[in-house]
Amino acid sequence: MLPSIQLSNPLAPLSLDNCTWVTAWCLVLLISGVSVTSPAAALDLDAGDYVAAPKGTTLGLLYLQAAERDRLYRGGQRQADSPGLDSQIGILRLVHYTELAGYRVAPQLLLPFGRLDGRRELDDASGLADPILAMPLWLIDEPERGRYLGVTPYLFLPLGEYDADEPLNLGENRWKLNLQLGYVEPLSERLSLDLAADVMFYGRNNQHGSARWTQRQKPSYQYQGFLRYQLTPALDLRAGVSWLDGGENRVDKLWLDDRQETGKWSLGFSWFFLPKTQVAATYGRDFAVENGFREEHRLNIRLLQVF
C-alpha cells in the first residue's frame, strides 16, 4: 500500500481571459487538494496481505514506488497541454503478529516518505508523509484451508511535511481513518482469490492554501481483487484490478465536482529467494480516470524480511 500525495496552492484569481481553461482546471486541482497518486483515498494492497502469519512473527518491509503521470482529466475528458507529475514514494513498515482476546491481530507502524517531481505549474517536493498506525484483526483464520477474513483500521496521523504556501505536499495536515475488509479464498490447490473493500473518512484541513481555507472531503471507497497462482512454494504470479470511487472535495463553501472514478490493473510476482526474505514486484497503470491525473506507468517493489 502507498499513501496519498496532497496538493495545495496559494489562492490566485482564476481568469479565463489570461489563461486557458485547462490551466484554470490545473489551478482548481491545486486549490482543491486532490491527490495525484491513485488518488487521495487509495490504500492499495498487495496480493496475499490478508494471509495471516503465525503468532510471534515479526515482519520488516520496505516499499518503493515509481509512477509517471502526464495526462490530466476533467469529467472523463483528457485535457490538452496538461502538466505532469512523477513520484518516487517509499514506506518503511513494521508488523508483529500476536493474539488479542483469542483473535489473531497484527499491530503495525508505517512511515511513508518520498519525492514529487512536477512539471509546468507544479513544483517539486520531498520529505516525510503522514505516518500510519494499523492493526488488522482476523475474524476467520484457517491456515489449514487457506481461508482468511480480516478487518483493519488505518489511522493517518497529520505529522508529515506540509506547507500551505507550497503547491505540492507529502503531508496532508488532516486526520484520516480508513476501514478495510479483506478476504482470501482458495479456488484450487494453487490458485487463490483475494478481495478487499474499504472506506476512507477525512478530517478537516484548516490551513489550506495561502488564504488558510478549510478543506473538507466526502468519504471515498475502494474495491480490489487479485488472483494468485502458486508456481512453487516460494514463487507466485498475481494479477489485480482496483476501482476507486467518491471523495469529492469542498474548499470553504465551494464543492469542486472532482469525484474520483478511477480504475487500474496490475501484474506481478512474489518470490522468497531466501527462506526468510521475499521480493515482490508489480507493474500497473490506470485504465479509467474521471477527474485528475492518469497514471501511465507504476512500478512497485516490496522487500520483506521475516524475523
Image (spheres, rainbow, N blue to C red):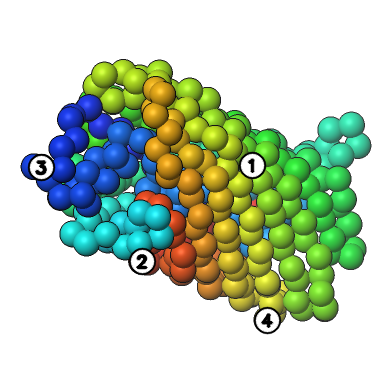
Single out the mark in the foreground, 1 or 3.
3
Name the secondary structure under disc 1. strand
> Distance between the Cα atoms at labels 4 and 2?
29 Å
Between 195 and 229, the residue placed more toward the observer is 195
Q: Which mark is residue 199?
A: 1
Instruction: Give the residue type at disc 4.
Output: Leu
Tell me which label, 4 or 2, sits earlier in the chain.
Answer: 4
Residue that carries the numbered disc 2 in the rendered image: 296
Mark 3 crowd level (few <14, some 14–19, many ≥20, 10 Å Cα)? few
Instruction: Give the residue type at disc 3.
Output: Asp
Mark 2 crowd level (few <14, some 14–19, many ≥20, 10 Å Cα)? some
On the image, the x and y values in percent for residue 127 come to 32, 36
Residue that carries the numbered disc 3 in the rendered image: 17
Name the secondary structure under disc 3. loop
Q: Is residue 167 left or right of residue 182?
A: left
> Distance between the Cα atoms at labels 1 and 3?
40 Å
Residue that carries the numbered disc 4 in the rendered image: 231
Tell me which label, 3 or 2, sits earlier in the chain.
Answer: 3
On the image, the x and y values in percent for residue 30 come to 29, 38
> Distance between the Cα atoms at labels 3 and 2?
32 Å
Q: Is residue 273 above or below residue 164?
A: below
